[in-house]
Structures are given as structure tokens and as C-alpha cells.
Image (cartoon, rainbow, N blue to C red):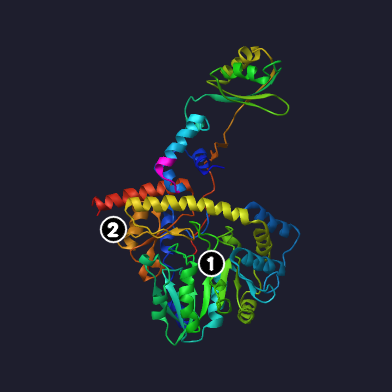
Amino acid sequence: MIDYQNFVNDKIKQVKPSGIRKFFDIAVEMDNVISLSIGEPDFQTPWHIRQAGINSLEKGKTWYSPNRGFIELRREIVNYYKRRFNVSYNADTDVLVTVGGSEAIDLVLRTLIEKGDEVLIPQPAFVCYEPLTYMAGGIPVTIETKVENNFKLTKDELEKAVTNKTKLLILPYPNNPTGAIMEREDLEAICDVIIKNDLMVVSDEIYAELTYGGKKHISIAEIDGMKDRTVVISGFSKAFAMTGWRLGYALGPSEIIKQITKLHQYGIMSSPTTAQYAAIEALRNGDNDVAEMKSDYDIRRRLIVGSLNEIGLKCFEPLGAFYTFPCIKSTGLSSDEFATRLVKEKHVAVVPGNAFGECGEGFVRISYAQSLKNIKKALKLIEEFVEEIQNGSKG
Amino acid sequence: MDKLLEILSENSSFTPKELALMLGEPEDYINAQIKEYEQSGVIKGYQAIVDWEKVPDAGVTAIIELKVTPKKETGFDEVAKRIMAFEEVTSMYLMAGQFDFSVMVKGETMQDVASFVARKISCVDGVIATATHFMLKTYKLGGMSFVDDEEPDGRSMVL
């Protein structure tokens, strides 16, 4: 009998599976569950974008693309970042097209981190940064962002976390799971600390198109002196509802892009060809689709935030992504208990906040990438659930 | 398009309070808007979308194409008014193309509808030809799918 534990790398054994999955798995087992736990758009990819992918297949374009991605796509990405976020890049040297934003995050971390380097990760945050940092040999240093600061990263918090081993800051805004955004003045405040301590920034801007309340996403790369020390990560999944196409990109200083391209080249070779043709169409003719989806998300966002506050689950106003992050402490339950009981008793799935870092305890993530009809139903059920807990009928 | 109308036309069961939240407007304003739409006739009414196939003895529906001779002074409207006055007629449109009116008729049996067409509609002054089409199955109505075996939400939790 082979003892596989002897073959498996010690580090990967230490990595825990994602805490989000558990609740999805429970939900899948049950009938009639309304899932507000999923982190992807409920919209399908707009038809003209799908059509562009289909056309490329009909024409037989089924080969590898260049390692960095098709130059047409890289040019469109560069145009898009200039048009939407006012940052200029060179399509020949500053862009790598990757298999989702996730691959880009992994590549950048593995390329930049040396053993023992500290990587600052504001939390609550998407679950991949810590394990990927750890696997790359770095030391993840989490920074607790606070609800009273609308889950923004403050200058003070950043300053306290920096040591002489700090190399990198991961900046995950607009934020999954909190829906927080960083505005220009918030970014300017932390840039001083970043420059003074000679840090690099990995800015995960995958939700950049989804901001509300008249706020436009500001890329940290746009702030004076920051473009040269920032790698921007983004992709097509959230803005264009293209999650399954698996296409993202990294934008950054040419020297870094050159290095991460080697990893991409040997590990992946090139990103999916069909997806790249679809993405070119998305960037050329997809602005209206994005605006329409965003307008629908906004209506749902307002309904869900207003209703949660009335139910007594206090919810700061999320201005980005498609998540709300209400505080559930008033129920006296832990995040895990709340989510488990809600799905079992009311068939509504949400994700416990502590899946996104310990400081998420006391909160749950509720996604509004779900139809209005289902959101309305789910809110009614959440209201009943909270009332029953407060009346102690099931407690 | 007006967002309020867009939402209500898809689902009129949202309360003014919910609509106020969704649109970021005060509840009073929403109430006033709805009242104005109702009074000016932009909003004609509120109905449930019923799948009659699931209701026993719910009867049959037919779409009748009508060719008519328009009147000299009043055009199609006068003929339309006579036809729409029958309570069996649930909706009626003036069409461009091969025929003039499309009239939706409800009756208890196919025989009822057939005799309604023969005895009532055909006799209306100006009507020159009719073609009756019985509806067999509803797939979609009022933006709602009536097909039960809809594909489930194909999204999975990946992280």
C-alpha cells in the first residue's frame, strides 16, 4: 500500500480547503434552495459576445494563441484601461492574457515573492491570496479592515502592518465579500506609506466595472508614482458575465510582465483561443451590456441593503461588486451557525463571513447576483428566520 | 424607459416601500408616481399571470384573424369598438400585414368559440373574412416561462 502522504508536498497539506464551498455543498443537497452564496453573475454572457466565440470556431480558429495572448486583444485591453480608468499601458510589453484573474494572481505572487517575504492582505477578502502567498514561500500578513471604516484599508492600518520584510501589498477593491471600494482620497492616503516603504502592489480590480452610487472605480495605478509599482489584475468574468470562459489579464511594468510570462508560458502556454475572440468583441462592443447589468445589480443592491437594515441585520452600504456584508451579531449566532441554520431551516444559502478571514466573524456574505424575484423571496425568509431567533422559538 | 414602469411591468407585486428602496426614491414619491400613471392611464391595471392549463375546466383560447372593410369616416376604430364590446374578447390588436385585426377570444369549449365567431363576429358590419386558430399550449406569457422543465441555475460554487 502506497502512503501518498509521503509523496505530497508538506506545504500543500497545510492548505485548508475553501470555507465557501461547504455551504454550497449543503445547498446542492437540498431542494428549493435560493442561493445567495454564489460569486458569479446570474446573467449569461451577452449574445453578441458568445457569437464572436462561435464565429471563431466556425472559421476553424482552434489553435494556440501567442503566449501573451493575441495582440488584437492586448490592444483592446490597453484601450479599455485607458478609456475606463485612465491608465496607459503598452500592448506589446505591459499585458499578459491569463486563464482568469486567478491565474494572474498566482503568477504575480510566485514571480515576486522570495522565501520569508511578507505579503500584506487586507481582510475580509477573497480566499485565494493567503494560500497562494503561502505556497509561493511568502508569509501572509493579514490586516483587519473594519466596518466603521466601511472596510477600507486605512493609512494607519497599513503603517502598523509594514515591517522591513514586507514586499507586497494586495489591494482587493472593489472588495469581495464586503462590497467596499477605495476612493481616490483613500488611495492617496495609503500611497505615501507604499512609496516610503518601497512596496509593490497587486491590485485586484476584477470588480472595477461594478461600482454604484455615482462612484467610479479608481485604479491605484492612476495615482502619481504608483503605476511603476503596481500590477493590475482584472478580467472578463464579472463585468461581462464571462466566468466560464476563463479569461483575465495582468497589466504592469514590462519587466514584471516579462518575468510572469515565463511562468505562464511553461505552465499554461496560452489562454483559451475561443475566449480571446469573444473578449475582443466584449471590449469593442460590450459597454452597453455592462451598463445594463450594472443598473440591474444596483436595483437589487438597494433592495437588499434597505431590507436587511430593516430586518435588523445592520448593513453598511456596499458601493462595489455584487455582495452585501451584513452584521449578524444581533442574532446572537456565530456566522457559521447563522448560515447553517438559515440554509437548513429556510433554504436560503449565504456564506459565513469568517470564510473570508477571521475578522469576517459576525458577518455573512449575501450575493445579489440573483433574480429580483428570488431576492424578494429570500429576504422574506431571512426576515422570518431572524424573527424566530429573536422570539426564541427555535433557539 | 422609466425604471419604475419597467419593474412594475415585470412584477407588480413589489410594495411601494420595496420600490422606493430599489429606486432610491422616497416612498411618497413612488406612491405619487404610481397614482399619476394610474390616473393618466399609463398603468391600465394589475393582473395575475395565470397558467390556465393547470386549472380544471378553464376553457379554451383562440386567436382570430379578421379582415374588415374600414369605414369611410372612422376607419378601423368603429369596427373595432363593436368587436371589442363582446365579453368573450380578451384582447384585440390592429395589425400590419395580411389581415387587419388579431382578436383573442376565450370560451368554455371549442364549439363555443366556433359558434361565437360564426354567429357574432362574422355578422358585425364590415367583417369580410375570419380565420380561427385555437391555442394548444402556452410556452411564455407576460415575460414568464410556462415550461416547467426549465434548466436549473447552472452556476456552481468554485471557491
Q: Is label 1 or label 2 in front?
A: 1
Please tell me whether mark 2 sits on a helix, a strand or a loop. helix
Residue A55 disc label: none
Task: Name the quadrant of the C terminus of chain A.
Answer: bottom left
Q: Chain of mark 1?
A: A
Closer to the camera in the image, A81 or A3: A81
Establish if A225 lies above or below B41: below
In the image, what residue type sits under mark 1?
Answer: Ile
Q: Are discs 1 and 2 both within one chain?
A: yes
Question: What residue does disc 2 label?
Answer: A330
Q: Residue at x 71, y 24 (%)?
A: B99
In the image, what residue type sits under mark 2?
Answer: Ser
Q: Residue at x 35, y 51 (%)?
A: A382
Q: Is residue A338 magenta?
A: no
Q: Chain of mark 2?
A: A
Tell me the magenta residue range: B24-29
Residue A218 disc label: 1
Does the rendering let one see residue B59?
A: yes
Q: Position of residue A140 (x, y in %)?
A: 44, 79
Left/right of residue A201 with respect to residue A162 in the rendered view: right
Q: Position of residue B24 (x, y in %)?
A: 45, 49
Does the rendering let one see residue B49?
A: no
Establish if B96 lies above or below A160: above
Left/right of residue A162 with respect to residue B141 in the rendered view: left
Q: Position of residue A115 (x, y in %)?
A: 48, 87
Q: Residue at x 75, y 61 (%)?
A: A60
CA gap, disc 1 and disc 2:
34 Å
